[in-house]
Image (spheres, rainbow, N blue to C red):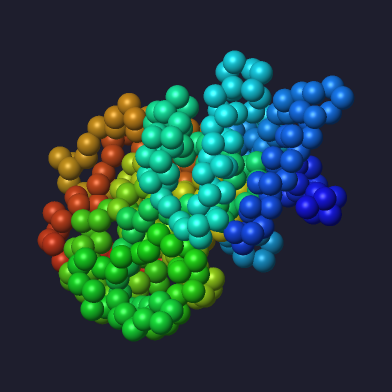
Amino acid sequence: MEDVRRSTIFFTEQHLSYADILTPLEVRARIEIAVLNFLKDLNSPTPAISNLPMINRKSSNSRVNQSLLTDVSWIFLSRSFCTKSLTRENSAKAFIRVWKVMEMCYGILLLEKRVTQRELFYKLLCSSPDYFTSQLQVNQTIQDVVALLRCSRFSLGIMASSRGIIAGRLLLQEPGEETVDCTKCGSSGYAISGDLNLLEKLVMKTDANYIIVIEKHAIFQRLAEDKVFNQIPCILITAKGYPDLATRFLLHRMSRAFPEMPIFGLVDWNPAGLAILCTFKYGSIGMGLEAYRYACNIKWLGLRKDDLELIPQQSFIPLTPKDMQIAKSLTSSEILQDNYKEELAVMVESGQRAEIEALYFHGYDYLGKYLANKIVQVHYI
C-alpha cells in the first residue's frame, strides 16, 4: 500500500478535472488512500483533522470545451478546488456524509453489487439518520465523492435509474441474449437499462439515417405507434422529460457507434425544453467531471420560433415564474450558443410558450410530416 501511496497523484492538482472509469479494486484503493491520509494527519506530531479537497462543482468553475475535430462541445470543470471541513459549522455534516457514503460504497464494491441512488438513500437513512434526511443530500454527497476520488459514479457501484425508452430502426443485442428489433417494440419501446456497463457492451446495428430525441413520452408513443421510422429512417429515443444518466449515456454511445448520423431534438418551445436540449448537448454542471461521457452533437429541430405560425393563437400558454427562472439561468450561462440565445429572447419577450401537442391542430398524423419537412429543408440549428 505504501508503494501505491508514493506512486499515486491522488489529492494533487496534477489531476485533470474528469472522473475516471475504474475497476472496483482501483476504487477501493483510492478510498483506502483517503483513509490512510486522514489517519496520517491525526497521528502526526501536530495532530489535525484534514479537510477533504475536491473539485469545485459551482457554475463559476464550469467551462465549455469545443472539440477541434468535431462539432461536439461539453461542459467541464477547471482545476479549482474547494474543501469540506469538520471544523467549519456550515460543512461539518457534509464532511461526515462524504465519509459515510465512501464507507457504504466500499462495502458495495466488496460485495460486487450495484445499487441505485434511491436504494443508497434508504440504506443511509436507516444507518445514519442524523446525517441523511433527504434524497438530495445523498445525490449531492455522491457527487462530492466523485469530485474527491475522481472516479465515475458507476465506478463507485452506483447504478443509474433509467426512465428512457427507444424505438425504430435499431437492432440491439445484450451479451448472451437474443437480438431485439426495436421496430417491433410498439409504442412502449425498448426499456433502456440503468446498468452502464451493460449499455457499453450492447451490440448495435442500424440502417437509420437519423436519431430523433423526443422530450415527451406521449409524443414518443404517438410517433412509435404511427411507425414514423418507416417514413423517416430513424431511431426514436426519449428520457420522458429531463434526461437521466443512462439515456444520455446510450445516446452518447450511439453517437460514437454511428458518428455520421445526425441527432435531432424535438422539445417544447419553452425554457425547460431548451434546458433539456442543452443537457443532452453539453452535459450538466452537477455532473461536470463526467459530462464529456454524456454529451452529443444534438441539433435543435423543433419547436422553434419559425414554427410558431403553425400553432393557433389559443394554444399558447403564458410563461410561469419557473419558466422565467430557467430562462434567467440559461441566459447567464456561457454554454448557450447565439442562435439559442435568440430563441430564448423571443420566448421571454413574448411571455409565452408552446407545446409540441399544439401541432395536432393540423391532425394527429401531422407530426410525422412536420419532422420530415424540417429534416429535408435542413431547418435545424
Instruction: Decide which of 71, 83 is in the foreground and name it.
Output: 83
Estimate the x, y position of residue 69 in percent, counting from the top left: 67, 66
Query: In this orientation, does residue 168 appear?
Result: yes
**Which quarter of the picture shows residue 316?**
top left
Instruction: Decide which of 301, 14 is in the foreground and name it.
Output: 14
Q: Is residue 116 left or right of residue 287?
A: left
Q: Is residue 61 depicted above or below 67 in this figure?
A: above
Estimate the x, y position of residue 377 in percent, counting from the top left: 38, 68
Q: Is residue 370 left or right of residue 244?
A: left
Q: Is residue 254 depicted above or below 353 in this figure?
A: below
Report the residue at 19% width, 50% height from top. 358
Report the residue at 50% width, 52% height from top. 108
Q: Is residue 360 depicted above or below 273 in this figure?
A: below
**Which quarter of the picture shows residue 373?**
bottom left
Estimate the x, y position of residue 153 in percent, counting from the top left: 54, 51
**Which quarter of the picture shows residue 24?**
bottom right
Report the residue at 34% width, 84% height from top. 178
Report the residue at 17% width, 46% height from top. 312
Q: Is residue 158 left or right of residue 212?
A: right
Estimate the x, y position of residue 363 in percent, counting from the top left: 12, 61
